[in-house]
Each structure stands twice: as C-alpha cells, then as structure tokens.
Image (spheres, helix red, strand yellow):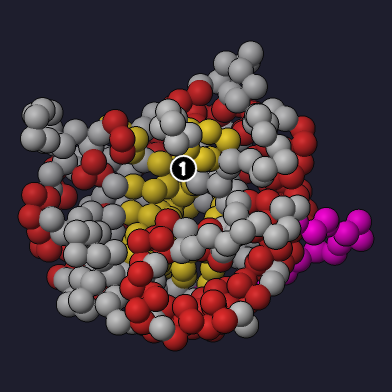
Amino acid sequence: MTSLLKMLLKNSSLTRSIRVLLAVAVFSLPCTHCSPPEQPDNATAVTPADSPQIPDRGFYKGILPIPGDGQTIDGAYKQAALHAEWAPVWAGGIGSSGFWDFAGDLAGESGTLFVEQLVRGNRMFPIINFSFIDKDPETGLLALKVPENMPGATLSDPAWRALYKQAVLDALTAVRPLYLSIGNEVNRWYEQYGIQESDPDGFQHFVSLYEEIYGAAKQLSPETNIFCVFSREIVDELREADLNVLNLFDPATLDIIVFTSYPHSVRKVTDDDSLTNPFNSPDAIPDDYYAKILGHVPDKLIGFSEIGWPSTDFYGGEQGQAAFISEVTGRLSVSQGIDLHLFGWPWLHDLDETDDMGLIKSDGTEKAAYTVWKNL
C-alpha cells in the first residue's frame, strides 16, 4: 500500500482536508496508464463477487461515507456500513484521471483499498459508476470527458467509443460488481445537445453506445445489473428534467431505472425571484413526482443512486430532512406502486460547517434524519 493511501486511512487531519474532494472525486492522481488493459480474446463469463440478501424493508440503502471531523476514512466506512448495504465507487474516488484508467486502478492497489477493504471488507457491495461528461471551465457547458491523446473527440468518434466500451468491460472483469452504471446523469447531455442527426455530439450517439456496451457487458457477466443514471431535476435551471429521454432507450437494456434526485431545487423561492409552487418542504412534492417515471418504463425496478434533501431551515430544518426520507420511502414511492430497489443518500457527514446535506453534522452530531435512516 502506498504511503499516500496509508495516510488517508490513518490520518484524521488529512481526511478532514480532503472531505470536499471525496464528495465529488475524493482525490486525483496523475494518469500513469491512460489506456486500460485490453480484454483477452478468450475471456470467460464473469460471476459477480457480491450476493447480498434484500433486507426486510424491501430495498438496499447506500451512502458515500464522508468522514466527520477527526474521523478516518476507514472509520467512516465502518460507521456507514452499520446502516447501509452499498457504497458508490467513482473513477476520481480511487485516484483515476478519468474513465480510461479507471479499470486499471480498480485492478490495482487503490481499487483493492476502496473496493475490497473499505466497501466489501465492511460487508457492503460497490456500485461502480462511469461518466462520460465533463464541464468546460470557460463556458460552463457540458463537454466530453477525453484523455489527453484524444483532443476534440466527439460522442460519435469510433476511437473514443471503443475506449469507453473497453474501459467498462475491463472494470467489469476487474471488480466483478453486481451493479454497474455506465453513465451518470446522462440526460443532462440530452437536455443540452438534443438528438440532431447532424450533431456528432447528439445524445443518440450515447444511446447507441450504451446499448452496444450493454450487450457486451451482459455477455461477459449476465448476472450484473447494468444501467445508466438519469437526473430527475436539472438543478442549475431549478426545474424538473424531461422524462421523455427514457423513451429513447430500449427498456430491455435498462436492468434498473436509476435517478439522482434533489427535488428541493425545483421552482424554489430565491432572494431575487419568487417562483410559483416551490418545493420548499417535502409535503409540497406531488404524489406522482416519481411515479411519472413508470409512465415511460413500466414494470421496472426503480433506484436512486443519490437522493437528498438539506437540513437548512429554509427547507424545514432537520425535521424537514427527516420527513423527506419518510416521504420518499412511503408516499412518494411504495404508495405509488414503485418497486424501490436502491436508495442512496448523498453522503454520511456534512462536508463542512456550510454544508447541510449529510445525515450527521461534520462535528459528529446526529441529525433527526439519521434516526429515520437507521430505523427504515
């Protein structure tokens, strides 16, 4: 184990300093191998390493184990595992530069640390998450995530597509996950680029790539649940996302329909603009807010890789956050005929004193929502 990884596990001051980075990527290391190992021609079928039993509540809980003040990463994962069955694993979270070296790191020392020791070693299962989306720092618009040797690549570029596909298959072989996402909040790309045939970055190119990867991944590991993640809200624009994007996919290639969701962002009242019908409290969310999904993909398991509500006073404080967990797992899902399968909270502790999305304050004080979380 490298000295850096040892320090991350043991040094509480280091875990404090990287807390914000862990929420989005944990940390980034230089790319030492920008091409993952090639899949051998004689590759045999992969059997998932995880075989969890569905809890009596009927769905799996997951969370990103952000450490609290003075807590090591190892301690955070142990604490999270007391009341969760899974944890997300991201490329940046294990030190990868992007999807192109994700598989190599998963198969190496950092993958062993995070996947085998921190996740599986605490009797949780990993959900492996890929993303093809980056953001242009100058324009703020979404851009394609590319390695240094592929400047200007597009979603329709054969070389880029082959690299992305191979990266997913190599990760599947390296980790043998039961759950694998091959695109995160993919409909944000759809909302920006649309599906113009003449556009080499049109969303239809991801749909075709996704379905190609799905077929290859299921051939390699038939028991792995393959999906991509959609965003229920376009947070930056304070609105719901266009669910018609679901109609672009062959439902047979989506083993689970998975979303991220932060409904407090929808039509909220701001300091300079009062919008109608703000979702400023959980009871303001319409009954069919998530059931609308079933109109596009009926008879599917539904999951949330991230779903959250802040404990800010403006949104009902700690009681509002606690009520949201109860509402989503009751009135807003099960009561609407949703077969809830995955329920993932963004992170365990607040990132710092200014954050309010965790179930526990950064100083270790448990919020009301954590009691609801534990008792689900």
Q: Main secondary structure of the magenta part?
A: loop
What are the residue bounds of the magenta stretch?
36-53
Q: Is residue 39 left or right of residue 83?
A: right
Q: Where residue 198 sits: x, y (%)?
A: 63, 13
SS for callout 1? loop
Q: Residue at x 8, y 35 (%)?
A: 271
Q: On the rendered image, what quadrant is the N terminus found in?
A: bottom right
Which residue bears the numbered disc 1? 185
Residue 331 at least partly seen: yes
Q: Where residue 171 sits: x, y (%)?
A: 69, 60
Q: State the residue lying farthest toward the top.
A: 198
295 is higher (above) or lower (below) than 204: below
Q: Where residue 83 sits: x, y (%)?
A: 35, 77
Which kind of residue does numbered mark 1 sit on? Glu
105 is higher (above) or lower (below) than 271: below
210 is higher (above) or lower (below) than 170: above
Q: Is residue 295 left or right of residue 235?
A: right
Q: State the residue lying farthest toward the right.
A: 42
- Seen from the viewer's position, the closer of residues 358 and 25 is 25
Q: Residue at x 60, y 65 (%)?
A: 178
Q: Is 37 part of what is drawn in magenta?
A: yes
Q: Is residue 238 left or right of residue 345?
A: left
Snapshot quadrant of residue 366: bottom left
